[in-house]
Amino acid sequence: MSLDKVVPSAAEAVADIKAGSSLAVGGFGLVGIPWILIGALLDQGADDLTVVSNNCGVDGAGLGLLLESRRISRVIASYVGENKEFARQYLSGELTVELTPQGTLAERMRAGGAGIGAFFTPTGVGTMVAEGGLPWRYHPDGAVALASEPKEVRTFNGTEMVLEESIVTDVALVRAAKVDRAGNCVFYASARNFNIPAAMAGRLTIVEAEEVVEVGEIGPDEVHLPGVFVQRIVELTPEQATNKDIEKRTTRPREEISA
């Protein structure tokens, strides 16, 4: 049995993603997002997608491209700033948005991948996260069309905690710095954020890799995500691997060095 999970192209990797699918997408802001897989999915045409991700890209980049093409109907996310089209669709009733605390979102995906149905956390107790009433979708007139339901709260060792259900998605799209042909992944620095739990949450996990190596070239102690969680690998070209946009560029005038 071959362990080689590399597929010929990103287009082939996402070809069978159906309309109405749920997607877990890795990355943080624009760092570590699966740029090429998102582009391939945009070309593929699947719509009515539910996206689980820390954020939904920015205007004109990342998941923002799928959003602008009206391909996303529901978002489960932690941070939704930097995207004017996202705000417009949400406030006009075109998009359902389930806001979730950042650590809770990561754990909901990790727990789903670990086979845990739900867990208790103190995060969100005493707020609308636990008590319900968070606007998930608006009417075009600005009234709340759908709001979150109250969640179970219990006390453990004197601390109140809220019950959060885990997340399992149809597909996960992630990006890794280095992957062997069996799917063992290594991530670099902050690009590691959300890629691991997103990969774990997907029933079908597709990884775009900046570098693909042979099995055995990644030491066991170097592996951040075991290949058991990965079904397909797309090897990026050198140009694709190095083409990374910056979400916010902050600069200052260069200071002249005196003699």
Image (cartoon, helix red, strand yellow):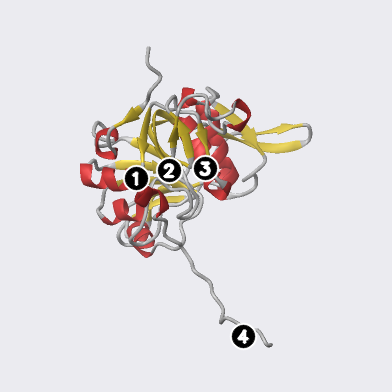
User: In this orientation, which residue lies closer to the viewer: 112 or 222?
Assistant: 222
Residue receiving disc 2? 210
Give whichever of 224, 68 is nearer the camera: 224
Using the image, tell me which numbered label, if any, was put on residue 208. Answer: none
Which element is circle 1 on? loop
Residue receiving disc 3:
194
Q: Which callout, 3 or 2, points to the residue nearer the camera?
A: 2
Residue 256: mark in rendering = 4
Per the image, label 4 sits on a secondary structure element best described as: loop
Give the residue type at disc 2. Glu
Where disc 3 sits, the SS reads loop
Type of the residue with mark 4: Glu
Q: If you read the primary sequence from the N terminus, does the residue marked by circle 1 or circle 2 appear first?
A: 2
Q: Are marks 2 and 4 in contact (CB under 8 Å)?
A: no
Q: Left or right: 228 with respect to 85? A: right
Q: Residue at x 45, y 62 (%)?
A: 246
Front of the two marks 1 and 3 = 1
Q: Residues within 10 Å of mark 2 (few under 14, many from 20)?
A: many
